[in-house]
């Protein structure tokens, strides 16, 4: 079976140069988004299908070789991409590694390390009321410490609280919906697309205008969870599957609380990078902001301090291992490389092979669904920026960016609302829609919870989230 899979993958690899060989260009002036054919997204589709299908049909192979599969698809893009397009391709690869991937992994590493040193001890029983309260708390704080920060802080207490439950997969799925995505919609600190909007001129507190939509979506999803969890909990109780703990109840307390200071430092470093302008430095032809480099350095220092100052006993009781962050780092390396052609074509707008997508957006609800659908599978930050620029071009062409954004907010604010909510909310539709989704899944599986497959998870989102988003569309857009 494995041999056949590798032979099939090898054939795809040999075909990839042909798929990429549209119009070629060797000068640095070539616009890759305009010359790449639509077929160049096949390796990206390949890595998504690998993530979806290998765990189902070849779980042992995937467990031992997922890093090799990710590397295969990354090389299937990188090698022919460089051979066909030369310097522009090298520039694009270096750009996504230095500007997007490394800062992304450094932030996740810092949050993962710091949150892994915070131990919530005491008697936590996964009743519907407690589960709903934990999800509500996570949803509220996600806008202030980021969806990744809130997810890493609360996922282990949620798992421990439900250790005695037979039905708990849905708890993790709704955790991803609410804490890892929807809750991050009210400040630029909450989710990368909104932070990117802040960097491009959207006022910091403008995102509070998304409060009505967020209250509606989060409230409805949380209500659905409470109904479902109550039903499953009562069914377990009636079947005698729930047993009262015989030991004395202990009060809830937080150990390793000094890590909350490091967590605040991470939030401060991220905010600093968006407000402090300290010039640029060029590395391998890529312009890197000094503030961003300072942020990444601070994040690594904070992660190191957390590791050095937190008792190993706390991490052991937290069942902390490096497995989830390694899996995310390896798989997202492949995703970031293979996503290059798709993002380049989207940035090219009506001049690229994906022009039919750009041309389809006219009304606010178009922006909501197309931004959301692409954010479910692509990096939601550049997707947000692509459709923000599409809106600016449609309504305020030729106007300087900051003035155009101010005009968009004043005269066409509903379009920015649609773009923002679509990018943030619909990151919950798949495991790869937002970074913490995959990490939460990895932590849950490492602690013995058999999470749904890629398509199994999408079944939850199709049944629960899509109807909520349809209602949101009719009410708000």
Image: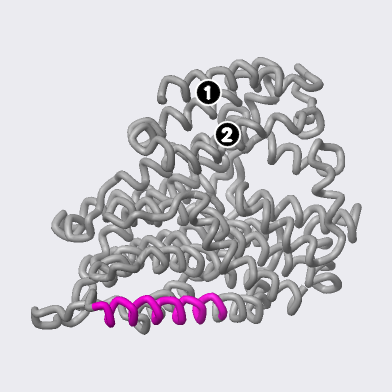
Q: Which residue is mark 2?
A: 46
Q: Quadrant of residue 137?
A: bottom left
Task: Choose between 244 and 22: the one closer to the eye.
Answer: 244
Q: Quadrant of residue 328?
A: top left
State if disc 2 and disc 1 touch (CB < 8 Å).
yes
Relative image position of residue 249 (x, y in whole percent): 14, 82
Mark 1–mark 2 Cα distance, whole angstroms, equals 9 Å
Relative image position of residue 441 (x, y in whole percent): 40, 54
Question: In which quadrant will I find the C terminus?
Answer: bottom right
Q: Which callout, 1 or 2, points at the residue further toward the start of the chain?
A: 1
- In the image: residue 109, left or right of residue 335: left
Element on which disc 2 rests: helix
On whether residue 226 falls in the magenta region, the answer is yes
Task: Choose between 387 and 292: the one closer to the eye.
Answer: 387
Question: In which quadrant will I find the N terminus?
Answer: top left
Instruction: Name the residue: 27% across, 55% down.
Output: 447
On whether residue 215 falls in the magenta region, the answer is no
Element on which disc 1 rests: helix
- In the image: residue 21, left or right of residue 319: right
Task: Choose between 95 and 377: the one closer to the eye.
Answer: 377
Outermost residue toward the left in this view: 247
Q: Quadrant of residue 105?
A: top left
Relative image position of residue 316 (x, y in whole percent): 17, 55
Instruction: Name the residue: 68% across, 21% down.
Output: 87
Query: Could one spot residue 395 in this view of the protein?
Result: yes
The secondary structure making up most of the magenta span is helix
Neighbour class for label 1 at 10 Å: few (<14), some, many (≥20)?
some
Instruction: Name the residue: 66% across, 49% down.
Output: 382
Q: Which residue is mark 1?
A: 9
The magenta segment = 220-239
Outermost residue toward the front in this view: 239
């Amino acid at each position: 079976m494995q041999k056949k899979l590798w032979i099939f993958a090898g054939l795809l690899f040999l075909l990839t140069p042909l798929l990429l060989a549209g119009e070629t260009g060797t000068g640095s002036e070539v616009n890759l988004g305009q010359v790449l054919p639509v077929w160049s997204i096949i390796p990206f589709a390949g890595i998504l299908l690998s993530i979806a299908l290998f765990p189902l049909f070849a779980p042992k192979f995937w467990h031992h070789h997922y890093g090799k599969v990710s590397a295969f698809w990354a090389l299937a893009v990188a090698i022919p991409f460089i051979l066909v397009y030369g310097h522009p391709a090298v520039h694009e690869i270096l750009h996504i590694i230095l500007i997007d991937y490394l800062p992304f992994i450094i932030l996740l590493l810092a949050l993962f390390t710091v949150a892994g040193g915070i131990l919530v001890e005491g008697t936590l029983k996964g009743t519907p009321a407690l589960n709903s309260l934990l999800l509500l708390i996570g949803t509220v704080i996600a806008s202030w410490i980021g969806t990744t920060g809130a997810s890493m802080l609360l996922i282990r207490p949620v798992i421990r609280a439900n250790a005695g439950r037979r039905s708990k997969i849905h708890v993790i799925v709704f955790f991803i919906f609410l804490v890892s995505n929807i809750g991050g919609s009210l400040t630029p600190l909450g989710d990368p697309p909104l932070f990117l909007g802040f960097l491009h001129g959207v006022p910091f507190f403008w995102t509070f205008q998304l409060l009505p939509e967020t209250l509606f979506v989060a409230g409805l999803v949380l209500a659905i969870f409470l109904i479902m969890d109550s039903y499953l909990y009562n069914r377990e109780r009636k079947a005698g599957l729930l047993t009262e703990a015989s030991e004395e109840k202990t009060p809830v307390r937080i150990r390793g609380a000094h890590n909350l200071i490091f967590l605040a430092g991470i939030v401060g470093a991220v905010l600093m990078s968006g407000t402090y302008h300290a010039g640029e430095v060029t590395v391998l032809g890529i312009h890197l902001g000094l503030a961003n480099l300072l942020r990444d350095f601070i994040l690594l220092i904070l992660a190191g301090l957390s590791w050095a100052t937190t008792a190993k006993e706390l991490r052991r009781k937290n069942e902390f291992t490096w497995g989830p962050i390694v899996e995310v780092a390896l798989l997202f390396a492949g995703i970031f490389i293979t996503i290059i052609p798709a993002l380049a074509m989207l940035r090219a707008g009506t001049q690229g092979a994906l022009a039919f997508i750009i041309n389809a957006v006219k009304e606010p609800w178009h922006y909501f669904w197309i931004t959301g659908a692409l954010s479910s599978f692509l990096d939601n930050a550049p997707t947000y920026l692509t459709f923000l620029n599409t809106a600016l071009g449609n309504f305020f062409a030729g106007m300087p960016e900051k003035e155009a954004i101010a005009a968009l907010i004043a005269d066409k604010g509903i379009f920015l609302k649609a773009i923002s909510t679509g990018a943030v909310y619909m990151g919950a539709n798949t495991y790869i829609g937002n970074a913490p989704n995959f990490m939460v899944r990895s932590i849950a599986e490492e602690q013995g919870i058999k999470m749904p497959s890629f398509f199994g998870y999408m079944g939850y989102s199709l049944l629960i989230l899509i109807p909520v988003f349809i209602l949101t569309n009719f009410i708000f857009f």
